Image: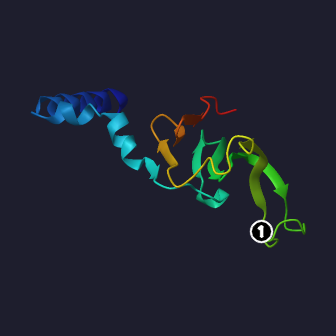
Amino acid sequence: MDRSNLARLVAAILVLVLSVPGMARLLNVDYRSLVSRADLDYNEPAHRSEEGTPVGNGRMGSLVWTTPTALRLQINRVDVFASNCATNSFPERHRDYCGGCGFVDVDFVEYDQDVFSEQTRQHLSCYDGLVTVKVKPWKFRCWRGTSRT
C-alpha cells in the first residue's frame, strides 16, 4: 500500500470513528482524573526511608518520610552509583547500588519532642508530582522538577 492510499485509509477510519456517537468523548481524556487514581495517602507517618513517599521526574527524585522530630528526604538520581559489588559499605554487596546521592533533614528538636505524631498525613499527587506532609500547624510540600536533566 503506498502512502497516499494509507493516508486515505487513516482519514476514512478517523471520519468513521468520530461520526459514531460517543467516540469523540473517548478521545477526550481527563488525564488529571485518570492519573489521580494512583495517588497515595498515608494516614500515619512513614518512619523509614523504604516506607517514604516517592516523588521525581524519572531521572532524579526523592523519598519523603518522617521521624518523630524531623522531616527527611533522600535525594536519588538514576546515573549515580554510590557503590559497586566490591564494596563493604552496603549490606547487599552482591549487587550494584544505584541512586542515593544524599539526605536532607529538617529537624524540629527545639520546637517539640514529637512534631510528627500519629496525626501526620502524607499525600502523593501523581498528576502534579507533589508530596504534601500535613501536621498541625504546618504543611510541607515537595515536588518534582519539570526538567529531566
Query: Which residue corresponds to the image point at 50% horizontal and 56% vertical from the top-left?
Result: 44
Q: Can residue 47 be seen by looking at this rendering?
A: yes
- Classify residue 145 by image quadrant: top right
Query: Which residue corresponds to the image point at 49% horizontal and 50% vertical from the top-left?
Result: 119
Mark 1: which secondary structure? loop
Pointer 1: residues within 10 angstroms few (<14), some, or many (20+)? few
Q: How many numbered marks are there?
A: 1
Please state the horizontal and vertical placement of residue 130, each as a whole percent of the image. 53, 37
Q: Can residue 1 be seen by looking at this rendering?
A: no
State left or right for residue 37 relative to residue 53.
left
Looking at the image, residue 28 lies above or below residue 40:
above
State left or right for residue 115 relative to residue 98.
left
Query: Which residue corresponds to the image point at 74% horizontal and 44% vertical from the top-left?
Result: 105
Residue under numbered circle 1: 95
Q: What kind of residue is marked 1?
A: Arg
Q: Nearer the viewer, residue 89 or 28?
A: 89
- Classify residue 12 by image quadrant: top left
- Image quadrant for the C terminus? top right
Looking at the image, residue 48 lies above or below residue 66:
below
Colouring scheme applied when the structure was drawn: rainbow
Please state the horizontal and vertical placement of residue 46, each as a whole percent of the image. 58, 56
State left or right for residue 34 relative to residue 135.
left
- Image quadrant for the N terminus? top left
Please state the horizontal and vertical placement of residue 128, each as a whole percent of the image. 48, 34
